[in-house]
Image (cartoon, rainbow, N blue to C red):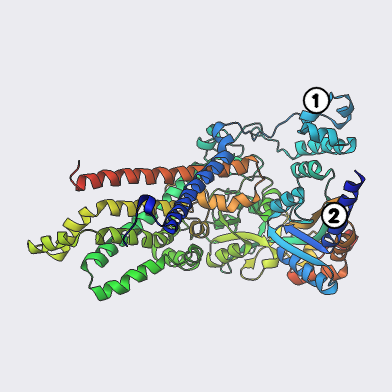
Amino acid sequence: MKQKFLMAAAVLLALIPVRAGNITVKGSDTLVILAQKWAETYMGKNPGTKIQVTGGGTGTGFAALQNQTTDLCNASRKIRAKEIETCIKAFGKRPTEYKVAVDGLSIYVSADNAVQELSMEQLEGIFTGKIKNWKDVGGADAPITVYSRENSSGTYEFFKEHVLKGKDFASSAQTMPGTAAVLQAVAKDKRGIGYGGAAYGAGARHLKIKKDSGSPAVEPTEESVLSQKYPIWRYLYIYVNPALDKGEIRDYLGWIQTEDGQKVVKDVGYFPLPKHLRN
Amino acid sequence: MGIRRGHRANLWEWLAERVIFGVSLSAIVMIFLIFLFVMREGLPIFLGSMSSSAVQEVIPVEQMDQMPKEQLRSYLGLSAKQFAEMDRETMQALMEVKVEQQKEIPNDKDAALNTTSWRYLLGPHQWTGYDKPEYIWQPVSGIHKYNIVPLVLGSLKATCVALLFSVPLALAAAIYVSQLARPTIREWVKPCIELLSGIPSVVLGFFALLVMASVLQGVLGYQSRLNAFVAGMALGLAIIPVVFSIAEDALTSVPRSYTQAALALGASPWQAAWQIVLPAAMPGVFAAVVLGFGRAIGETMIVLMASGNASIMSLSLFDSTRTITATIAAELAETVFGGHHYRILFMIGALLFAVTFVSNFIADLVIYRLKARMEGKA
């Protein structure tokens, strides 16, 4: 019995050095570029640490977190109760949540479109299919083509919850495989409208957004997003199994929230975390 | 030497034969296993034993200690082993999460429906917020709406356009190349068409997305840039080489003596090709079309990129469309393993499998009949 125990201990000890210094990150496609930049910068400064980043989508990341095939999960939305439940069943604890950056979603139209601003209510109408013509929102008399994302994307879910208030997208909404594809489609389609992360901003024109019909129209800039004047924004998160939240991983997560880590956020095109949310 | 048979066969020949037999057998077994796997994953939907109903009973956390053990275990959805190993704190956390889940359920009269039952998979329903009963595919939603009719229609629309576009072209090319073209031309044209099949479908899809969609919209002036028509045309490009090469083989394998006899009796080369060779090669030509159908309905990347992927119930070819294959490709990665969305996707995958299987089977049957008739056996 004692021998067996010793052997097990030896095996465990042999495993630990391999485990340490290797961090796997998986999840949201929105975060994948940012996470890769973080990893590169961090590995440049800490040559002993190896960080592997893969995308696949927020849901995939949570699934991997539950199966314990990844250390960190990138998420572009908050974790759901159902997902917390499976996590508790898998490792007995709620995953720890870290806010790591802020993302403002832009609404894109073709550069030829006369419309300059929309209210949240008008957006809801357009994307649920209630408003079908540009002339109803102050544009030319032309039908609106709605471009959306695939329903596997965190951006899709965020937009649905936040802008459509949980209602369904119009079934005539065309779904594109990525924000870049949405932008391309909108750039080529004078009657098109689409949405996407601020990081992909170049290519088509974004609209100013009004919280309601009485309030001023706001452009998505760092100032307006961080001061929450611009109404369509979200936090980006990293989730971790609390049992793993120590040593290398703790250092890495801490570094992400420092000035250094948040500078990378800006470089990639998202917005840095407000100071009071950094640990 | 000659070929040796039976017990006198060379050991190596015997071995080679066995190996080849094993390989072909494993292919058959593999197909069978894949089908079994897809069916197994989709089976709960076929049988209607899955429920997506969001409403469940919630027990306040404080009552945890009064609950009988067995009731607590089934309420938390734990196996006996899990339950025995779990400490009180973890269970309390689970109880709290159950309450949180209840808050996430939309306040909606449809929340209690099991949308994975066949009635909602195939029939229209008036969901909250809709003006009339509709066929809706909105799997990621407060209420999961899984109506597969728009997807089936979308697949059929794109496939029909593809066949209508490619079959006449491919058959005409096959007749020309095999019967009418001069040998030098044939040597150039045939490999060129077959080269089309070497284009990866993702490249064709990209081409359709960027170039074909704009050009066709410019010419025909319809509203949505990406639609069943564009996707169908691009699909057509993908299946032209398939239909062409099989049809060409079939036409070429008609004995030369048929043509020669027709020509000797005074037919023109065109008459010989159209009235003699084509009917004689009909089984092969038919097989080519059916294989083209199978390839078109199963093709994913092109439709994913060029069809617009909007699940609209409409017969117009110029509306965006969402096919079964594109739906599976786009959504499967994000589904919860073993959840109802996951199972539904496998179910439509199995459906697709069945459709291609049945179409190939019917084709085989027809070919067999036609062949028998041609050879004067029936």
Chain bearing mark 1: B
Residue at 49%, 59% in the rendered image: B302
Q: Which residue in the protein does label 1 denote?
A: B70
The N terminus of chain B: image quadrant? bottom left
The C terminus of chain B: image quadrant? top left
Disc 1 is placed on an element classified as helix
Q: Amino acid at mark 2?
A: Val
Left or right: B362 in relation to A97: left
Which quadrant of the figure has residue A148? bottom right
Q: Around disc 2, counting alpha carbons within 10 Å, would you say few (fewer than 14), some (14 to 19), or many (20 or more)?
A: few
Q: Around disc 1, counting alpha carbons within 10 Å, would you say few (fewer than 14), some (14 to 19), or many (20 or more)?
A: few
Q: Are tags 1 and 2 found on a single chain? A: no
Which quadrant of the figure has residue B244? bottom left
**Tag shown at residue A11:** 2
Residue at 37%, 43% in the rendered image: B361
The x, y position of residue B263, in whole percent, is: 11, 64
Chain bearing mark 2: A
